[in-house]
Image (spheres, rainbow, N blue to C red):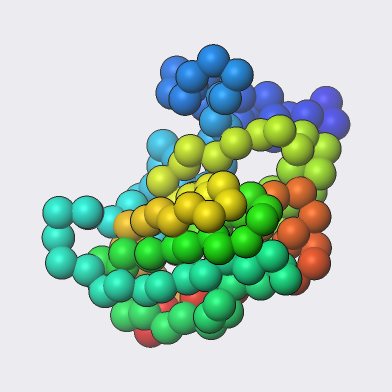
Amino acid sequence: MHPLAAILAAALLAAAPAAAGPGAPGHGHGAKGHADAAPYGEPGDPGKPARIVQIVMRDEMRFVPDRVTVRRGENVRFVARNPGELRHEMVLGTMAELKEHAQLMLRFPDMEHDDPNALTLPPKKSGELYWRFTNAGTFHLGCLVPGHLEQGMIATVVVR
Ligand SMILES: [Cu+2]
């Protein structure tokens, strides 16, 4: 089996029981189902106090700010806003994971993300993503709308 086909098959299997609704199946990558194992951490607890990090998703294919520093173990509440005309996403991951995922998105552009490490925003919408970074290191927030990552829509998250 072609590697991408294998990834897709696994993703569809993982997402099947949690499909968001007719015509909008999610696909599992990264943290879904095994969040504790993700090097960049685990879903945060919306019920707990959190550090607020504001992110603006811009049609110029960038996140503002494009570099964020947080503390290991901190509950982070990303508050994201998409003021433009295009749909954008922010997906947390390692650079390798995001690049691999972006390749997959070019082949299957209609996929949607409902994973706890991802937030998709239509134009003029805002949303939140709670995350707890459990390891120090350098991670990334990428936009996986097809072509956006390739145009530089990626931010760096430094965990100290
Ligand atoms: Cu984008």
Where is residue 23? Give x, y as percent.
60, 19
**Residue 77 shows in the view:** yes
Find the residue positioned furthest to the left: 48
Quadrant for ligand 1 reads: bottom right
Where is residue 34? Give x, y as percent.
41, 42
Q: How many marks?
A: 0
Q: Is residue 2 left or right of residue 119?
A: right
**Residue at image x 80%, y 63%?**
150
Q: Is residue 119 left or right of residue 150?
A: left
Q: Quick one: quadrant of the N terminus?
A: top right
The correct choice, above or below, for 130 with respect to 68 in the image is above
Where is residue 63? Give x, y as percent.
59, 72
Find the residue positioned furthest to the top: 22
The correct choice, above or below, for 88 with respect to 83 in the image is above
**Residue at image x 53%, y 80%?**
65
**Residue 139 shows in the view:** no
**Residue at image x 40%, y 54%?**
127
Near-viewer residue (100 or 116): 116
Residue 112, quarter of the rendered image = top right
Q: Is residue 3 left or right of residue 55?
A: right
Near-viewer residue (48 or 7): 48
**Residue at image x 53%, y 50%?**
121
Residue 74, quarter of the rendered image = bottom left
Where is residue 160? Give x, y as percent.
38, 84
Near-viewer residue (90 or 86): 86
